[in-house]
Image: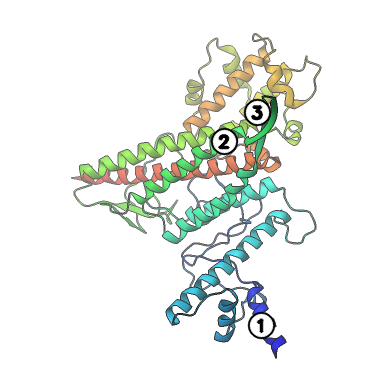
Amino acid sequence: MENLSNSDENYDLGYQPSPSFVDQNDQSIPETPGYSTLSGESFVYGRTCSETSAFSDPIDDHSCCSEASPSHWPPKRSMAQNQAVLSRLGTKQRGSNEDEKQLDYLESLELELEMMKERFAKLLLGEDMSGSGKGVCTAVTISNAITNLYATVFGQNLRLEPLNPEKKALWKREMDCLLSVCDYIVEFTSKSQNLSNGTALEVMKSRPRSDIYVNLPALRKLDAMLIEILDSFEEREFWYAEDGSVSSNSSRTGSFRRVVKRNDEKWWVPVPCVPPCGLSEKARKHLRHKRDCANQIHKAAMAINSGVLAEMEIPDSYVASLPKSGRASIGESIYRFMLGTEKFCPDYLLDCLSIASEHEALELADSVEASMYTWRRKACIKHSKPSWGMVKELMSDVDLSDKNHILAERAESLLFALKQRYPELSQTSLDTCKIQHNRDVGQAILESYSRVLEGLAFNIVAWIEDVFFVDRAVTSQE
């Protein structure tokens, strides 16, 4: 009997498998293969890709319970077993209320431990649960985890309102866990140290890697500012209607996201409503201020994301797929315009093209980017160094009057103007290829973190614009 009692106590302290934590207030995200673009039902913003997270479980807003495999159901403990656990932990019994608090705390610790075990296992397996070694690398695993955590927390948040407390806690807890990897990504620098006898020694000292040291605190600050913007709409003069449309045949200039005719296009997006007399001047001032803040956050996150992507190595598979002729890639008319003018104006060229859809804009971005790298490679072909990684260094030695160099510079300015005009544009083929083949964990964290913050900031600006649009429509009718 003593052996049986001991085995029972050991069973309780052995942290038997229990189901992963599931927030019953969240919306479940369907599992998709790596780097598939989110549907409109999940996001408005196209640059944020959605994959199934290895670190966060899908969550359902409308579910009443979460089912787990019977083999993972935790055994129900008897009071005697719970008393034994508390006794082993040196906890004194001071009444039923304290016992319940202690047991709840013990259960939460056990759930946290099981979650950490699952995350660690999926990270090592590279999301390949078969264990056959066919999983993705660590960098891609963490990038997928951040992307899908964003989808889980913000994917169904389509309103200007504070984030659900459970979702906010989930976002903070899991992001802290994912970003903690950066604490161990360091670089070594030499430092002079004087001994007691006056001897000077040069020792190596570790410090955070420069890109992480600069960008990660900035991204954390942008994250906190976006959460603060959503929290500021706890008391508001407008509200949302699930169905209906406020106007017809109108769209925002320079954006493909329509704010009207949602019965046909985005019927699932809630429509903002304002009082019959419109918003007060105080509410409008508050909305303008938050829109300007979100705009600045969007620009900052976009700059960080572009910088990180620019530092990533260009995969050999993309280089092999480059066209032999940049002229054939972008088309004869665009080529003649880029080469035939002494002063190139990318905005004027975009106006002449009359881009009508996001698909056309993305297709143009892909072709311009491919042509740019084709011309750069041709400009550097006279050098004997064949490595594509040397292109950046070789470009400084290229003759600035070379035709290929001029075309590459103009293609780069055209691509930049295109992304500035349509900031909600999906990632180009090169960006997606870089993310898929990236092996640098630090760059993967910075890229995915900045990308999801960029998407959230863009959505907030779009939601505020929707409220302003309805407010203008109501006041104009009066």
Q: Quadrant of the C terminus?
A: top left
476 with respect to 295 (left or right): left
8 with respect to 95 (left or right): right
Q: Residue at x 48, y 21 (%)?
A: 348
- Earlier-in-chain disc, 3 versus 1: 1
- Earlier-in-chain disc, 1 versus 2: 1
Residue 8: assigned label: 1
268 with respect to 75 (left or right): left
Q: Position of residue 203 (x, y in %)?
A: 69, 30
- Classify 429 as above or below 106: above
The kind of residue on which mark 2 rests is: Tyr
69 with respect to 223 (left or right): right
Q: Which residue is mark 2?
A: 213
* SS at mark 3 in the image: strand
Q: Which residue is mark 3?
A: 193
Q: Residue at x 65, y 29 (%)?
A: 196
